[in-house]
Image (spheres, rainbow, N blue to C red):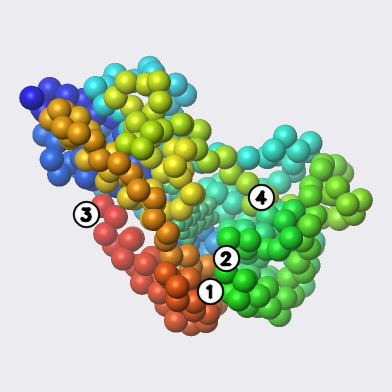
Amino acid sequence: MDYKDKKIIVLGAGFAGFQCAKFLNRFFPGQITLIDKNDYHLYTPLLYELDEGKVKLPIKTSAKFIQKEVSDFHELDYDYLVLATGAEVNYYNIPGLKESAITFKNLEDIKKLQKVPAGEILIIGGGFTGCELAMELAIKLTGERLKIVDASTCILPNLDEELRKKAERRLRKWGVEIFCGYKLTKVENQQVFFENGKVFKFDNLVWTGGVRLGRHKVDEFLRVKEEKNVFAIGDCASTSPGLIRPALNQAKIAAENIKRSIEGKALAAYKPKVWAVVVPLGGYYAVAKIGKIKIAGFIAWFIKEIINFWYTKNYSR
Ligand SMILES: Cc1cc2nc3c(=O)[nH]c(=O)nc-3n(C[C@H](O)[C@H](O)[C@H](O)COP(=O)(O)OP(=O)(O)OC[C@H]3O[C@@H](n4cnc5c(N)ncnc54)[C@H](O)[C@@H]3O)c2cc1C
């Protein structure tokens, strides 16, 4: 099979797309095009530091890069297409939420968060991102009241209980109030309304309560169902847990499967694995679960630093 006549497009230069283009480049002599609406690669694990310089990484790739927002991938001209467009914020159709809240997902968000005016800051969504941001703001700001509100029975529900308690203690020690079991029903006139009848006023509202993962249904080989020669990886694929490691792993499998497909070989199945989780909580402190090992404090923070350093130095190599 002649490789060099084929055209491969990777849509999205986030973690999954960038990595996939990198793997494709190792074997594919034909045209590889990487498309993204932005002209940078966003390093989300450091977004909580609200420092643009740390998260806006240049696009350095051997693929042909095109900056363009694609609304319908069917309009692209390809032999193989890899969809890696990430997750979208999910507002769950809650009235007033989209109009009133800052999200915490991109560069525009951190620009808004850098200048949050004084007063009551309400973060809705007590998952990893909400807690990371709350701790950072608690340390950076003085005099403001910070609340984290979550619909479930606890914050950080995906974390081990022992680590969760440590995280809660740290947040409370820094003055963050935590409210669980509060399901948001609407936002109106600088107030949020909950199903349990409670109402909170706010000056600044941050929504970290949900993203829509898995828009594209894929099979075990990461092929998009009902499409020909289209793969989906990372947060936009139905196999995604919404984390970076699995996105990088899927990128490798998709590249490999394009190669196998061109060569007429059997495809490789994607096998999800359990990954480590590290949650930075302000200063030199983090909580981490790596395999069965639980760590809290400086060492966990240092592990995260090593990961950040390694990724930001090597992502384009
Ligand atoms: C604040 C925050 C902190 C996080 N921290 C961690 C962490 O510490 N560890 C961890 O494992 N995960 C973390 N995550 C989750 C992690 O960022 C995602 O799982 C990861 O980004 C998924 O990679 P992706 O390539 O699928 O999507 P993304 O990295 O989101 O990339 C998608 C790309 O597609 C582009 N795009 C989207 N639509 C279009 C379009 N229509 N046309 C052209 N381009 C388009 C976007 O510009 C973007 O570059 C965090 C997420 C957030 C928001």
Sequence-first tag of 4 and 3: 4
Identify residue type, mark 3.
Answer: Arg
Expressed as whole percent of the image width and height from the top left, the position of residue 9 reads 28, 30
Categorize mark 2 by other alpha carbons within 10 Å: few (<14), some (14-19), many (20+): some
Pointers 3 and 2 in contact (CB under 8 A)? no
Furthest residue in direction right, as rendered: 197
Expressed as whole percent of the image width and height from the top left, the position of residue 195 reads 86, 47
Categorize mark 1 by other alpha carbons within 10 Å: few (<14), some (14-19), many (20+): many
Give the position of the C terminus as an image quadrant: bottom left
Give the position of the N terminus as an image quadrant: top left
Task: Identify the residue under disc 2.
Answer: 159
Can you tell which of label 2 and label 1 is closer to the viewer?
2
Residue 134 visible in this rendered orientation of the protein: yes
Sequence-first tag of 4 and 1: 4
C-alpha gap between disc 4 and disc 3: 34 Å
Q: Which residue is drawn at the image coordinates 78% and 63% (left, top)?
A: 179
Sequence-first tag of 1 and 3: 1
Task: Identify the residue under disc 3.
Answer: 317
Q: Is mark 3 within 8 Å of ligand 1?
A: no
Identify residue type, mark 4.
Answer: Gly
Task: Identify the residue under disc 1.
Answer: 287
Q: Where residue 209 is drawn, which disc sits there? A: 4
| Label 2 secondary element | loop
Answer above or below: position of 63 versus 227. below
Q: Which residue is drawn at the image coordinates 47% and 24% (left, top)?
A: 71
Identify residue type, mark 2.
Answer: Leu
Q: Where residue 124 is drawn, which disc sits there? A: none
Categorize mark 4 by other alpha carbons within 10 Å: few (<14), some (14-19), many (20+): many
